Image (cartoon, helix red, strand yellow):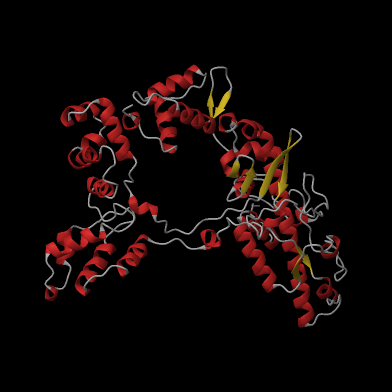
């Protein structure tokens, strides 16, 4: 006797569709439409008859149906037994959720505006980002320059990294040219100075101080504290980085208010000028589920516009003859069976997604009403137990699936977080703790920033028991610098 995993091709297809993101699912549907003549897209305005593809008379009996808990998995000795009989029940026509598969979501999820929207710029939504090198080469082509200087300029531009700094030294760049060109170091430096006049300001710098100095030189000469700011970034950049304000005031012979104004001018500059040129393509997120509030009740709806509706082509399905064993009829029968299973897998995917999303909203009503600080602890086991499915299924359905809420678009996994004990014996989610830490830091005295130990003490005063190292971990995950780097001169 032994145990083995039994997964039918239909179950494998259902699980594969379940873990696909919306964009990947749209591509999968398009491939299915192109490869299977029995499948067709349901056009807007047409009546959708689920009974037609699901109960076609071309066969003696329909293929095995997917039951409500088609994605429910049970583990025994690290194995799962899934028999074809588990798929024998028909998926109900009306799902036990707020929105059924046949419903049409009325509110358009498209971001395309009307034709009379004067502020719509198609290129900003569709064009591919420009690289820093191409941006600099475009400016180089507009600059009058000899062939030798242009060669030097192209080499220098290739040595500029994504942050806008020159990675190689001038000596290394000069040594890389053909000796027959007889290019000297001062020529390379002269061309570099010309490139440093390009946009964005500060490009081609070799150090942070030089980058800030280049930006200061492009400001109007009448800018207050210009000469002092240039001296600060040239001679005392290290003291500024360590926030040793007392030493700065003593060595620059300035008062506290004067130094504060100079530092404000320096902080208005960009230490990474190359980052202004965005080279990566925009990433689009299509929400799978839409949550809205109606009469003090949170409603969960599938975004029907994200996935096209499919059906079996009734004309082609009628060509299938019951007792015919010819090659053409066998091909059509197989295509009909695959089309039915594909549609059922889509229906089961959406049903499972709705069940999970509904339970998430039920658990996280506080977040929807009050924000991150009201987020409750939630793990996969809680949702799996509520919907009667395996944790691995919940993991699949929450990966790369997004929920549109009045507070923004979130991945379903965002609503899951570990818990920390409170003084009253309750639990507080790590997401809520991060929100509290962010709020404490935003309200701190910038002359005396809160240390991790102090934040831990403030959390303990609110009944949340968090160790200092845990506060440091949460602070770093939020991108908040340590207290020594957050100190400001008021």
Numbered marks: total: 0
In the rendered view, would you say 425 is above or below 275? above
Residue 73 seen in render: no
**Image spot of residue 185 (x, y percent):** 12, 63
Which quadrant would the C terminus be assigned to in this image? top left
Residue occupying the point 62% across, 43% down = 391
Residue occupying the point 45% across, 60% down = 129
Residue 134 seen in render: yes
Residue 443 position by quadrant? top left
Residue 371 located left or right of residue 316: left
In the rendered view, would you say 364 is above or below 287? above
Residue occupying the point 60% across, 34% down = 378
Residue 10 position by quadrant? bottom right
Residue 467 position by quadrant? top left
Residue 57 located left or right of residue 211: right
**67 vs 99, nearest the viewer:** 99
Q: Residue furthest front?
A: 222
**109 vs 135, nearest the viewer:** 135
**Image spot of residue 392 (x, y percent):** 61, 46
In the rendered view, would you say 115 is above or below 335? above
**Image spot of residue 44 (x, y percent):** 78, 62
**Image spot of residue 300 (x, y percent):** 72, 43
**268 vs 34, nearest the viewer:** 268
């Amino acid at each position: 006797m032994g145990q083995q995993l039994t997964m039918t091709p239909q179950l494998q297809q259902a699980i594969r569709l379940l873990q696909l993101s919306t964009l990947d699912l749209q591509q999968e549907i398009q491939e299915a439409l192109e490869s299977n003549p029995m499948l067709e897209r349901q056009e807007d305005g047409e009546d959708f008859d689920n009974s037609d593809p699901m109960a076609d008379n071309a066969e003696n009996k329909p293929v095995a149906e997917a039951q409500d808990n088609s994605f429910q998995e049970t583990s025994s000795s690290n194995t799962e037994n899934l028999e074809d009989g588990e798929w024998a029940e028909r998926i109900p026509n009306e799902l036990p959720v707020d929105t059924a598969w046949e419903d049409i979501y009325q509110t358009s999820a498209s971001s395309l505006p009307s034709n009379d929207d004067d502020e719509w710029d198609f290129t900003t939504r569709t064009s591919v980002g420009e690289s820093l090198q191409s941006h600099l080469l475009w400016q180089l082509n507009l600059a009058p320059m000899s062939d030798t200087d242009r060669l030097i300029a192209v080499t220098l531009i290739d040595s500029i990294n994504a942050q806008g700094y020159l990675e190689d030294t001038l000596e290394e760049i000069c040594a890389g040219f053909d000796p027959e060109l007889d290019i000297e170091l001062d020529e390379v430096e002269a061309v570099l100075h010309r490139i440093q006049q390009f946009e964005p300001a500060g490009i081609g710098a070799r150090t942070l101080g030089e980058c800030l100095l280049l930006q200061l030189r492009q400001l109007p000469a009448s800018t207050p504290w210009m000469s002092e700011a240039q001296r600060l970034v040239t001679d005392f950049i290290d003291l500024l980085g360590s926030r040793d304000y007392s030493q700065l005031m003593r060595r620059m012979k300035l008062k506290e208010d004067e130094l504060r104004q100079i530092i404000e001018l320096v902080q208005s500059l960009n230490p990474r000028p190359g980052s202004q040129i965005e080279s990566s393509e925009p990433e689009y997120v299509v929400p799978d589920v839409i949550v809205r509030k109606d009469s003090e009740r949170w409603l969960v709806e599938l975004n029907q516009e994200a996935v096209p509706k499919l059906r079996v082509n009734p004309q082609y399905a009628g060509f299938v003859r019951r007792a015919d064993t010819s090659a053409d009829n066998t091909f059509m029968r197989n295509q009909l069976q695959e089309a039915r299973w594909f549609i059922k897998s889509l229906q089961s995917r959406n049903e499972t997604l709705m069940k999970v999303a509904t339970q998430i909203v039920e658990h996280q009503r506080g977040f929807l009403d009050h924000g991150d600080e009201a987020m409750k602890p939630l793990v996969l086991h809680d949702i799996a137990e509520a919907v009667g499915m395996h944790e691995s299924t919940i993991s699949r359905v929450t990966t790369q699936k997004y929920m549109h809420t009045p507070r923004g678009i979130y991945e379903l996994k965002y609503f899951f977080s570990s818990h920390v004990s409170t003084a009253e014996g309750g639990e507080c989610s790590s997401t809520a703790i991060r929100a509290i830490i962010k709020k404490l830091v935003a309200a701190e005295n910038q002359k005396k920033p809160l240390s991790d130990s102090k934040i831990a003490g403030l959390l303990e005063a609110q009944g949340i028991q968090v160790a200092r190292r845990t506060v440091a971990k949460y602070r770093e995950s939020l991108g908040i610098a340590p207290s020594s780097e957050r100190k400001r001169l008021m």
